[in-house]
């Protein structure tokens, strides 16, 4: 079986692995129809998570659309042939943390995440031909055939995260909203924010081609690489700052951008994955300006997957709009390189076995 393996920073390639087999009653075996690369995977690719990856063995990928090919004896929700996706974090659905909605902090699986190395459960990744999904009844979901593969892939991470970001921001009609980062999750967050009758939705990024995508959907766009970008953004709010900001990048610089642009009493929903060891957060600034800061990069996506399906079935959101490239699994190295370097107007990558 062909599987993507982490060999070091900027070195992820396909290798042969033994075919997976069910070893526990709560598992299902699935055959991959398609997978993709998430922005959080780029932290892994650039080496930020190198110490926790076992070179030559750790698998990558946490987004999936697949068909069930075998079912463990205690699995009750799925049968052979079902079309499924799963949350990027593996959760049992029965422990206290799962019951209170903190599925990424499942007490049974101990924060297990697909494709993210030894400390996160050492699970197999989705960049493969087939894989085992443990505790399937707890975090796997059936996907209607009417939803295309590209859109379905966003159920594992991007779309539920965008829903969570909007819930945390609690956007009210007429409020001015800034979205930092126009990758797929940021654009999906933008789609939802635009539907909330916000006053102005302003998307900020460094790549003109991504900003052009946001502008076509009706957002105001600002390139933060250009001189005067901050003054331009604040001028849209008459200098007071934005009511709500959604951060979807996960770098120290982008969190600082949020603090520079938020108004007193405003809300920041930071759902980017902050993988760097240090960043400068001046808490007295947050305190004195009464800023509400929500950091939710380790998102509990499983409870919001069903809402993502509803949004797609009703035509409110079409995540397929944001897929720019398709690669074969054997070319996973090129897919990562293209996405990481943002070459060829890369936005979202589909990977086929």
Image (tube, rainbow, N blue to C red):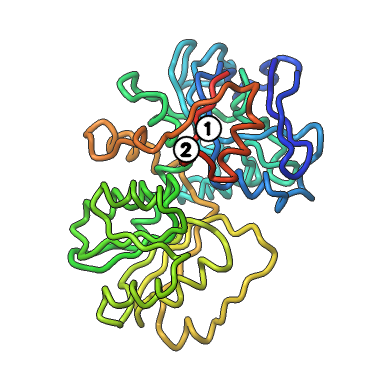
- Which of the 4 image quadrants contains residue 310? top left
Mark 2: give few (<14), some (14-19) or many (20+) Cα within 10 Å.
many
Q: CA distance from mark 1 to mark 2?
A: 8 Å
Residue shown at 55% from the left, 11% from the top:
69
SS for callout 2:
loop
Residue shown at 72% from the left, 49% from the top:
47
> Which residue carries the number 2 mark?
348
> Which residue carries the number 1 mark?
36
- Give percent across and percent down for residue 97: 53, 50
SS for callout 1:
strand
- Which of the 4 image quadrants contains residue 273? bottom right
- Give percent across and percent down for residue 62: 57, 36
Residue 238 appears left or right of 266: left
What is the quadrant of the N terminus in the image?
top right
Residue 15's disc is none
Q: Which one is nearer the viewer's eye here, 97 or 34?
A: 34
What is the quadrant of the C terminus in the image?
top right
Residue shown at 68% from the left, 28% from the top:
4
Residue 119 appears left or right of 131: right
CB of mark 1 within 8 Å of CB of mark 2? yes
The disc, 1 or 2, on the residue closer to the chain's N-terminal end is 1
- Give percent across and percent down for residue 20: 69, 17
Q: Which one is nearer the viewer's eye here, 344 or 349?
A: 344
Residue shown at 51% from the left, 73% from the top:
256
């Amino acid at each position: 079986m062909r599987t993507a393996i982490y060999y070091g920073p900027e070195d992820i390639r396909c290798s042969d692995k033994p075919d997976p087999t069910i070893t526990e009653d709560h598992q299902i075996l699935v055959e991959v129809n398609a997978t993709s690369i998430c922005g959080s995977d780029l932290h892994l690719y650039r080496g930020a998570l190198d110490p926790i990856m076992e070179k030559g063995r750790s698998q990558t990928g946490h987004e999936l659309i697949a068909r069930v090919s075998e079912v463990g004896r205690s699995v009750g929700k799925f049968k052979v042939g079902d079309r499924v996706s799963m949350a990027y974090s593996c959760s049992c659905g029965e422990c206290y943390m799962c019951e209170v909605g903190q599925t990424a902090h499942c007490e049974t699986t101990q924060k297990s995440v697909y494709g993210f190395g030894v400390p996160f459960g050492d699970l197999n990744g989705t960049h493969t031909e087939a894989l085992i999904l443990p505790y399937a009844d707890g975090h796997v979901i059936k996907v209607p055939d009417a939803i295309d593969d590209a859109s379905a892939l966003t159920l594992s991470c991007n779309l539920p995260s965008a829903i969570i970001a909007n819930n945390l921001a609690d956007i009210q009609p007429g409020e001015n909203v800034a979205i930092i980062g126009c990758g797929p999750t940021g654009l999906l967050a933008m789609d939802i924010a635009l539907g909330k009758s916000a006053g102005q939705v302003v998307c900020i990024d460094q790549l003109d081609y991504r900003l052009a995508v946001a502008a076509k959907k009706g957002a105001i766009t600002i390139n933060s690489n250009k001189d005067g970008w901050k003054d331009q953004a604040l001028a849209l709010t008459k200098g007071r700052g934005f009511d709500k900001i959604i951060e979807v990048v996960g770098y120290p610089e982008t969190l600082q951008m949020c603090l520079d642009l938020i108004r007193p009493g405003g809300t920041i929903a930071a759902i980017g994955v902050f993988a760097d060891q240090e960043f400068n957060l001046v808490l007295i600034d947050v305190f004195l300006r009464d800023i509400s800061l929500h950091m939710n990069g380790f998102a509990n996506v499983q409870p919001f997957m069903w809402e993502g399906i509803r949004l797609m079935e009703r035509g409110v959101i079409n995540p397929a709009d944001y897929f720019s490239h398709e690669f074969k699994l054997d070319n996973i190295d090129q897919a990562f390189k293209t996405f990481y370097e943002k070459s060829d107007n890369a936005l979202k990558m589909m990977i086929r076995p």
